[in-house]
Amino acid sequence: MRTLIITAALLLSSARSGCASPSTSETPPAPPPPGKSAAAPGPNEHVDEGALAPFREEGVEGALVVADVASGARTVVNPTMADKGFIPCSTFKIPNTLIGLETGVIPDERFSLPWDKKKRKGPSEWDADHDLTSAMRNSVVWFYQEHRRA
């Protein structure tokens, strides 16, 4: 349930930011593999339409797929939408941070990285040293790319 709540929050935040779907000029996503479509859920797939409530409460559309890699079981919320491709935008930073904290790559909330003095395309706020709080607040892509490499 915790994963569902975290992922739903990610999707809601993505939908609010207007960064929830690819542009129409991009190549459409490949169709889902057999047994993984909305029309034909696989044997280990459970469709949970009741979990759409948080999306409806916020007045946004959303989808969620939670996979258990050990068993292959999947829980799908809004399978029709889940079958479409979407750009994750900055939502990757939340699970990236959680993984870093869990693995010890990020030791605590005071974790910081010095700026490498390389100018990047992006907001001027990126061109500075950052800690976890400022990197999240300013959506500092290089910070997340760098700590992922550790």
Image: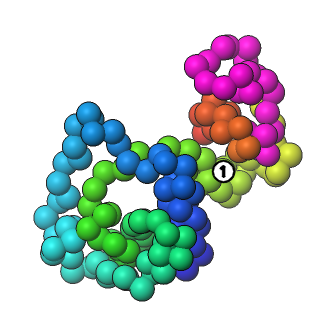
Residue 37 position within the rendered picture, expressed as x and y whole percent measured from the top left: 20, 67
> Residue at (56%, 45%) from the top-left corner?
90
* Residue position for label 1: 97
Question: In the image as oriented, which residue stretches furthest toward the right?
Answer: 110
Can residue 63 be spotted in the picture? Answer: yes
> Residue at (38%, 48%) from the top-left corner?
21
**The C terminus, quarter of image:** top right
Residue 17 position within the rendered picture, expressed as x and y whole percent measured from the top left: 55, 49
Dividing the picture into quadrants, the one containing residue 36 is bottom left
Q: Nearer the viewer, residue 79 or 42?
A: 79
Question: In the image as oriented, which residue stretches furthest toward the bottom?
Answer: 50
Question: In the image as oriented, which residue stretches furthest toward the top?
Answer: 118
> Residue at (27%, 39%) from the top-left corner?
24
Amino acid type, label 1: Thr
Count up the numbered dots: 1
> Residue at (53%, 76%) from the top-left corner?
57
Vertical order, 46 against 95 (above or below): below
Residue range of the region highlighted in magenta in the rendering = 114-135
Colour option used = rainbow
Q: Nearer the viewer, residue 108 or 65?
A: 65
